[in-house]
Image (tube, grey):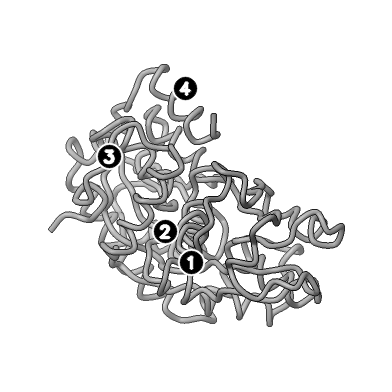
């Protein structure tokens, strides 16, 4: 069973969608990568702390959206930035537990192929090993949608071997020839290209047809939103401030360097990753529908997810 489904089942078994905080503080999560540009800039510049007063903000960092979902459902987290993939899967199995407040980022991922592998089109991936970061995440769904568009059925029919590989392990996998391609968030793709290990097959603005799909959204525990509307309103106002700040590429690059520290890649690689990510408050309906379609085709969904539950309210 994919990790996102295991985490969801465990969180529901331990008490379902918890009530969240008391309202005098807001517990906010994020993932420390460039697709979470709005969050990392907001944290780095203390936008959330300033804009949400008098409420206190407690920031938590998660390695994956799966972990953030589990925290939201258990009631130990009130809101989080995460990919749309885990949100779709969660609302399929626990309707009404999460609410999408706003978009935060589009695109931000690329499909790269091993240099010298002779891969020129997505159809050339037949019989190849293609990596992705995690089951049910946004890159997983985007990869499956692109394979299907090229006439490949992927893991279900064995035409393409889809392999879960942590982003941090991509370099080793490409060096050893263990992967022929990967659909990964930036700056991981740019790092492989910079080292001469890969070349870009599909740039960020061509993934899921045109790159107009929600890579990152701001999600809130639905019960917390109902019980603490003033705090949610302040969170949305702080989010919009962070979006405005994150539209400056140099601000995103500085925040990413501060969060990653000594392991930060070269400036040119960070700049390429920043360019691949589109900061926005919108959630594109067509791109979202494609992700739902891919999740359903992969067998991740228990019930079909109405598109309206994945879009921010008025």
The residue to which callout 1 is attached is 37
Left/right placement of residue 219 relative to residue 43 reads left
Q: Residue furthest right?
A: 176
Label 2 sits on residue: 216
Nearest the camera: 67 or 241?
A: 67
> Which quarter of the figure is the C terminus placed in?
bottom left
Distance from Cα at disc 2 to Cα at disc 3: 21 Å
* First in residue order: circle 2 vs circle 4: 4
As displayed, is residue 56 above or below residue 209?
above
Q: CA distance from mark 1 to mark 2?
A: 9 Å
Q: Residue at x 45, y 33 (%)?
A: 70
Q: Which mark is residue 10?
A: 4
Query: Looking at the picture, how far across and down is residue 298, in whole percent?
Result: 46, 43
Whether residue 47 appears in this view of the structure is yes
Q: Could you say which disc has been placed on residue 304 in the image?
A: 3
Q: Earlier in the sequence, mark 3 or mark 1?
A: 1
Q: Are marks 1 and 2 in contact (CB under 8 Å)?
A: yes
Binning the other alpha carbons within 10 Å of mark 1 as few (below 14), some (14 to 19) or many (20 upward) gives many
Mark 2 and mark 4: span between their CA atoms? 24 Å
Precedes in sequence: disc 1 or disc 4: 4
Identify the residue shown where x is 60% and y is 61%: 184
């Amino acid at each position: 069973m994919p990790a996102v489904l295991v985490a969801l089942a465990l969180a529901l078994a331990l008490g379902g969608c918890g009530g969240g905080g008391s309202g005098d503080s807001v517990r906010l999560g994020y993932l420390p990568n460039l697709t979470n540009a709005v969050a990392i800039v907001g944290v780095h510049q203390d936008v959330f702390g300033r804009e949400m007063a008098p409420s206190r903000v407690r920031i938590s960092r998660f390695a994956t959206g799966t972990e953030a979902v589990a925290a939201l459902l258990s009631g130990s987290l009130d809101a989080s930035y995460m990919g749309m993939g885990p949100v779709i899967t969660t609302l399929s199995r626990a309707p009404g537990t999460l609410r999408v407040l706003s978009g935060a980022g589009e695109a931000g991922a690329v499909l790269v192929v091993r240099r010298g592998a002779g891969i020129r089109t997505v159809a050339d991936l037949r019989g190849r090993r293609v990596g992705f970061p995690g089951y049910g995440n946004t890159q997983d769904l985007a990869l499956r949608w692109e394979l299907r568009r090229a006439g490949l059925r992927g893991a279900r029919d064995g035409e393409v071997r889809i392999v879960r590989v942590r982003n941090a392990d991509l370099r080793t996998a490409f060096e050893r020839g263990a992967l022929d391609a990967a659909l990964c968030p930036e700056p991981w793709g740019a790092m492989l290209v910079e080292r001469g290990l890969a070349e870009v097959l599909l740039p960020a603005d061509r993934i899921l047809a045109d790159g107009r799909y929600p890579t990152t959204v701001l999600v809130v525990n639905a019960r917390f939103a109902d019980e603490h509307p003033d705090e949610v309103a302040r969170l949305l106002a702080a989010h919009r401030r962070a979006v405005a700040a994150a539209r400056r590429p140099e601000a995103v690059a500085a925040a990413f360097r501060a969060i990653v520290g000594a392991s930060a890649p070269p400036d040119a690689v960070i700049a390429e990753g920043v360019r691949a990510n589109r900061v926005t408050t919108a959630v594109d309906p067509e791109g979202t529908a494609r992700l739902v379609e891919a999740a359903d085709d992969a067998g991740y969904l228990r019930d079909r997810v109405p598109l309206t539950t994945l879009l921010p309210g008025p």
